[in-house]
Image (cartoon, rainbow, N blue to C red):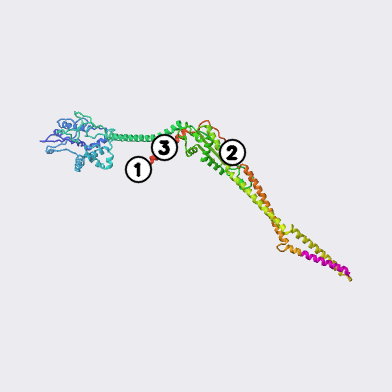
Amino acid sequence: MTTKPKARKFRVRRSAPVSHAPEEASAPQVPPQPRSEQPTRATAAPAAKPTQPARASAAKPAQAQASSAPGATPPPGETPRQRPQFSPSQEAPKARAGEVSSAAQVAGEVDMDAIRREGLTGRQLRMARRVAQKHGLAPTSDFDAVRLLRARGIDPFQRANMLELVVPEASGAGGAGAVPPGAAAPGQPPAQRPDGKVQLPQTVPAGGNRIQLPSTETASPAERRAAEISKIQQELAARRRKRLMLLLTRLAFFVMLPTLIAGYYFYVVATPMYATKSEFLILKAENSGSSMGSLFSGTQFATNQDAIAVQSYLLSKDAMLRLDGDEGFKAHYEQDWIDPIQRLDPGASNEEAYKLYKRNIEIGYDPTEGVLKMEIMAADPETAAQFSRALIGYAEERVDNLSLRKRSNAVTDAEEGLAEAEQARAAAQEKLVRMQQEGAVIDPEGRIAALRSQINNIEIQLQEKKLALQAQLDNARPNSARVQGAEGEVRRLENLLAELNADMTTATTGENSLAEIAVQVQLAEADLATRDLMLQSALERLEQARRDADSQARYLTTSVVPVASEDPSYPRSFENTILAFLIFSGIYLMISLTASILREQVSS
């Protein structure tokens, strides 16, 4: 801080009236304009240097002394002023002693005295000077800075103004970074008091023969602020680098290292496996029956259940045990040159072997096409092909066995039906024969028909005899012998007709009538005919069941024959390594997110 420079004081003494020349010589020189008005000139003339006001103020008293001498000429570039003239009768004005100040300077002093009485702290005054420099003002003191800011309507102690104190670098005369008039130039040491102490704030006059020492603080506030910002940025960058290094370390330990281990295993350690692929489908035998099931024969819907059953069987432990017994599945995977992960321990249990079996065999079923696709892996290509052929044989046997019980049951049911039909036919035939024997009539219907024929003949003869008798009786003198003979014939025919009617009545009525016997015989014959038909149907069903039992109901057709491969199919090193990387990355990401969420919850 610097103090406001004071204008020089002049004392004019007059002892007697003076002439015009002495008046002009002794006329007091107008003091220089106070420094409170210099900021306006500094802004109007930005090219003026900071040391010019001090030099001008130092040169003006000398000019005043030179002008007061008799016969002195005005300096070049100035117009001589007209001096006041006093007549001899008038008395010269009395000399006045004191400080010569302008109205603006007096008003500024009054305002600064009022500001001094406010009791502002040194920090507030320094803040006011910085705010004034920020707004392009050139105060001569801290109190003058407060006065100038208030004159512009700016509150120097407002929080927003205090937070925005940034002094830009000096970019030319008149700028915000220009040194105010009357202030000490950068790098000049402050003036010392007589007792050897430095009195701050105060101004240091520019010029002179004093040695100017460089200041230890050469950076401007903007440079210091930029340095602090740069330091903060460097700390942030260092913190980011540290966090990045920690992140990279965690990624390397939890993701990259396991991925490298997995890749090393897949590329170097893993035993190459040879895969053999095959495809087969199940067909149903053509059936001559006309049932609704024959509509789907020849399609995948007819063998859908069989295909699913075969797939389940090939993936079962039963198939693995049978393959081990026939082809030595366990012995193949217990060899020493297979890597430890894919190798089966010697003497391993069936459960461990079954786990390995499910890893090395894949069977898929396509329901739209009805095709079973099988892929089996082994350490040797020929062994893989042999395993595939053996499994296809097991599947074919399983398909045959699926309908074996059904066919056996069909034959058994047909034989039982035939036996029952034969027994029923024998009973019906025996019943018919017994009825014929009990009635003593082989053909009751024929007997009844014969009686009806006889009755008809007798009735015709009786009518003829009656007509002949009536013709004899119509004569006037009939012959008695003929009449008696005709009457005897009519009587005999009537007796015979009565007997025949009695026999006919006896045969058609009662429990043992011929009519009842005929009905029972007809029922027995119908029952016998039905039993004959049932016996014939049972014979046909038995023959069909036997033919079905002898033939194969399901056929397994191999569309893709298993062939031994020349190049190993597994492991797929690149794909498996990428998959391992993704898996470890996902696990690390989940753990990191969980930890960050828990840390945030705990901290909040």
Residue that label 2 marks: 557
Is mark 1 in CB contact (under 8 Å) with mark 2?
A: no
Q: How far apart are the alpha carbons under marks 2 and 3?
A: 46 Å
Residue that label 1 marks: 600
Compared to 211, does 37 lie above or below?
below
Secondary element at tag 2: strand
Q: Which label number is shown at residue 268?
A: none
Q: Residues within 10 Å of mark 1 (few under 14, many from 20)?
A: few
Q: Position of residue 409 (x, y in %)?
A: 60, 47
Residue situated in front as seen by the camera: 196 or 549: 549
Is mark 3 in CB contact (under 8 Å) with mark 1?
A: no
**Foreground label between 3 and 1:** 3
Residue 224 quadrant: top left
Q: Magenta stretch: give its range.
A: 478-501
Residue that label 3 marks: 585
Q: How far apart are the alpha carbons under marks 1 and 2?
A: 64 Å
Q: Position of residue 431 (x, y in %)?
A: 69, 56
Q: Amino acid at mark 1?
A: Glu
Per the image, is 249 magenta? no
Secondary element at tag 3: helix
